Amino acid sequence: MMTEIEHELRRSASRSDALPDLAESASAAGLLDVAFATLDSPLGTLLLASTPRGLVRLAYVDHEDADSVLEQLAAKLSPRILAAPRRLDEPRRELDQYFAGARRRFEFPLDWRLTRGFTRRVLQATAQVPYGATASYKQVAAQAGSPLASRAAGNALGSNPIPIVVPCHRIVHSGGGLGGYTGGLERKRRLLAVESGQPQLTEP
């Protein structure tokens, strides 16, 4: 993966008096398809990845191994993947504001390419559930076109590649039970508590 990038960067460097940082050089050479960075949050360290289309992945690194996440992105999207924190400045800024209780809606674009079919429809329905509200698995299944597919909707939410931003924590059982959550139920409880007006998130 890195061999091709490094080769092209060396060629670019030979034509320039000053070599910018690796990510910027790769971008200028058309070799950066997926940028990633980490963010220290009250819910633990997050790994964020974006493409020119938008944020494509957010992972809790204590729940999903960061190297495995990056390997999956390289396999599914492109092997041209590099740490490029500046490319993630806007998502990281908005997430910081969200955790501080100063933002209720994310404005940066999303890249949905890691989802498809019913799963994508469920997640896009989930993305419409507003801050401070909840919906049931049955409701998002119905909005995705399959009102009897509550369990399949739960599976789709369990594979959400962009938690928090696509707020699967806002989806609960019709009877009031929390259901599941990729990052663990404690994180789901904390996110719902903050969005319901309880004290802001602090470091665990």
Image (cartoon, grey):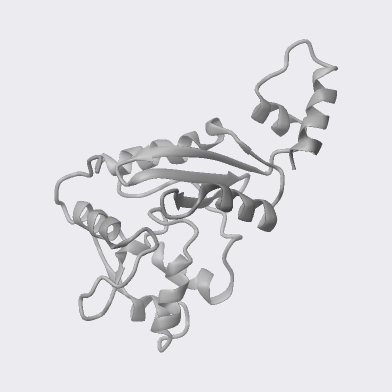
Which residue sits at x=30%, y=64%? 170
Q: Does residue 143 appear in the picture of this structure?
A: no
Q: Quadrant of the C terminus?
A: top left
Numbered disc total = 0
* Image quarter in which the N terminus is found: top right
Residue 74 falls left or right of residue 197: right
- x and y, in percent, of residue 42 in the image: 29, 42
Which residue is depicted at the point 71% across and 43% down?
80
Residue placed furthest toward the left: 198
Q: Position of residue 20 (x, y in %)?
A: 68, 19
Residue 177 is left or right of residue 153, and the answer is left
| Residue at 45 percent of width and 81 percent of height | 152
23 or 43: nearer the eye? Answer: 43
Rendering quarter of residue 177 = bottom left
The answer to whether any part of residue 88 appears in the image is: yes
The correct choice, above or below, for 60 with respect to 84 in the image is below
Residue 61 is situated, as x and y percent measured from the top left of the image, at 44, 48
Outermost residue to the top? 17
Reply above or below: 157 against 20: below
**Residue 194 at what x, y percent from top left?**
21, 51
Give the left or right position of residue 152, taking residue 15 as reference: left
Farthest residue, direction bottom: 148
